[in-house]
Image: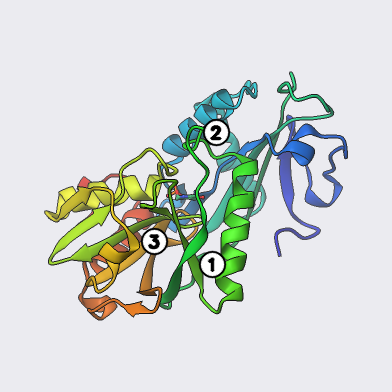
C-alpha cells in the first residue's frame, strides 16, 4: 500500500527504490523513539501538485528536531525542493508525504550525533474518512507537557496515540478524544478538536497539544469568514449536547464528528460551521496559491 516496485524514496542524500531502502536494527529511534517526523499533503491543482503549507510543516520539522537534540543539516528550502522532486519522481499529485528524521546505531540515552533523513510519499485517502465518526473520551491522557516537548512531532509520542486509538476501536467507537493531565479536553490521537455551540467555535489553547497546521488554518478561515473562535479549556461535559464538532489534521483534513461518549451533536453536519470550513478547506488546498485571500 505504501510503496511498490516503482516507488522512489530519498534516503540520506540518495534517490533509491523503496524496495532497496534499509536501516540498521541498532538504530536509536527504533529502540527509544527519539526521532521526529511530519505528515504533509500535496494536492492536484491547475498548476500541478502543490504542497499545502509546506513551509509551516518544515519549520515544525526543524523545531521538533532541535527540541529533541537531533541534528538536521537541511534547510526548509532544501526540504521543500526535495519534496517536489519526490512527487515528480513518483508521478504523484494528490499525495501524503512523510519526512522522517531518525537516529542511527546508538544505545546510550544521549541523543546520537548523527541523523538520517527519509522522505517518502504515497496516495492516501482521508485518515478518518468522510462519514461522521463516533468518538469516546479516552482513558489515556496526552503526555504531560512537563515530561516531553508536546509541541514537537516525536516518534515516541505516538505510542500514546496508538493506545488511545486501539482502546476506542475495541470499545466500538471510531476515534478517541484525549484529555490533558488536568482533565480538560486536549486532542485526538492524530488531530485537533473543535466544537460549535450557539454559533461560536471552541478549541483548547496550546500547551497540551500539537500545534496543528490545520488548526491554524481553521483560525485563518474563521477570521476570513467572520466566525467567532474562542480558545478555552473545557471538559467533555461542556461538549455534550453541543451543535457540532470536528477534528482537524493534515491527514484527516476537517472530519465531522457524530457524537462524543454517545451524546449526539444536535445539528446535521451540513448545517454546521465545520461543514462550511470543510468545503472552504478543499478550495484552499486545491488553489494554486496557498492564501485565504485568493479563495473566491
Ligand atoms: N495532533 C496530533 C497529535 C497529530 O498527530 C496531528 C497530525 N499531525 C495533529 C494534531 C494535527 O496537526 P496538523 O494539522 O499539523 O496535521
Reading the image, the residue beneath label 3 is 247
Reading the image, the residue beneath label 2 is 148
**Quarter of the figure with residue 210:** top left
Residue 88 as seen in the image, left or right of residue 128: right
Marks 2 and 3, how far apart at CA: 23 Å
**Quarter of the figure with residue 27:** top right
Q: Position of residue 119 (x, y in %)?
A: 66, 41
Quick one: SS at disc 2? loop
Mark linked to residue 176: none
Looking at the figure, which quarter contains the N terminus? bottom right
Quick one: SS at disc 1? loop
Q: Is 177 rendered above or below residue 17? A: below
**Residue 222 in sight from this viewpoint:** yes
Residue 264 vs residue 113, the one in the foreground: 264
Crowd rating for badge 1 (residues with CA inside 10 Å; few <14, some 14–19, many 20+): few
Residue 272 as seen in the image, left or right of residue 31: left
Marks 2 and 1, how far apart at CA: 31 Å
Quick one: SS at disc 3? strand
Q: Position of residue 127 (x, y in %)?
A: 52, 64
Q: Position of residue 159 (x, y in %)?
A: 64, 51
Mark linked to residue 125: 1
Q: Nearer the viewer, mark 3 or mark 1?
A: 3
Q: Tally the marks.
A: 3
Q: Position of residue 230 (x, y in %)?
A: 19, 50
Q: Is 89 rendered above or below residue 31? A: below
Q: Is tag 2's residue or tag 3's residue first in the polypeptide sequence?
A: 2
Kindly identify the residue that appears in the image at 33 percent across and 78 percent down.
263
Q: Nearer the viewer, mark 2 or mark 3?
A: 2
Residue 32 vs residue 116, the one in the foreground: 32
Residue 227 as seen in the image, left or right of residue 103: left
Amino acid at each position: 500500500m505504501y510503496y511498490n516496485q516503482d516507488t522512489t524514496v530519498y534516503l540520506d542524500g540518495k534517490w533509491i527504490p523503496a524496495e532497496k531502502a534499509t536501516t540498521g536494527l541498532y538504530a536509536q529511534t527504533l529502540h527509544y523513539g527519539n526521532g521526529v517526523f511530519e505528515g504533509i499533503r500535496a494536492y492536484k491543482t491547475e498548476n500541478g501538485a502543490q504542497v499545502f503549507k509546506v513551509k509551516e510543516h518544515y519549520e515544525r520539522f526543524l523545531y521538533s528536531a532541535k527540541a529533541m537534540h537531533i541534528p538536521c543539516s537541511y534547510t526548509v528550502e532544501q526540504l521543500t525542493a526535495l519534496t517536489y522532486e519526490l512527487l515528480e519522481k513518483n508521478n504523484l499529485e494528490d499525495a501524503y508525504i512523510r519526512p522522517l528524521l531518525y537516529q542511527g546505531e546508538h544505545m546510550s540515552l544521549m541523543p546520537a550525533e548523527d541523523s538520517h533523513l527519509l522522505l517518502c510519499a504515497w496516495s492516501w485517502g482521508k485518515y478518518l474518512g468522510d462519514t461522521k465518526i463516533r468518538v469516546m473520551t479516552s482513558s489515556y491522557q496526552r503526555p504531560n507537557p512537563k515530561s516531553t516537548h508536546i509541541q514537537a512531532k516525536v516518534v515516541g509520542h505516538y505510542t500514546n496515540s496508538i493506545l488511545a486509538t486501539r482502546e476506542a476501536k475495541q470499545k466500538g467507537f471510531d476515534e478517541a478524544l484525549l484529555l490533558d493531565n488536568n482533565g480538560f479536553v486536549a486532542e485526538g490521537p492524530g488531530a485537533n478538536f473543535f466544537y460549535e455551540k450557539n454559533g461560536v467555535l471552541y478549541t483548547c489553547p496550546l500547551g497540551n497539544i500539537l500545534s496543528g497546521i490545520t488548526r491554524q488554518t481553521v483560525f485563518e478561515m474563521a477570521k476570513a469568514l467572520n466566525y467567532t473562535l474562542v480558545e478555552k479549556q473545557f471538559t467533555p461535559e461542556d461538549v455534550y449536547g453541543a451543535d457540532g464538532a470536528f477534528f482537524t489534521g493534515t491527514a484527516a483534513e476537517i472530519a465531522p464528528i457524530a457524537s462524543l461518549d454517545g451524546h449526539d451533536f444536535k445539528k446535521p453536519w451540513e448545517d454546521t460551521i465545520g461543514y462550511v470550513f470543510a468545503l472552504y478547506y478543499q478550495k484552499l488546498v486545491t488553489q494554486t496559491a496557498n492564501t485565504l485571500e485568493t479563495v473566491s
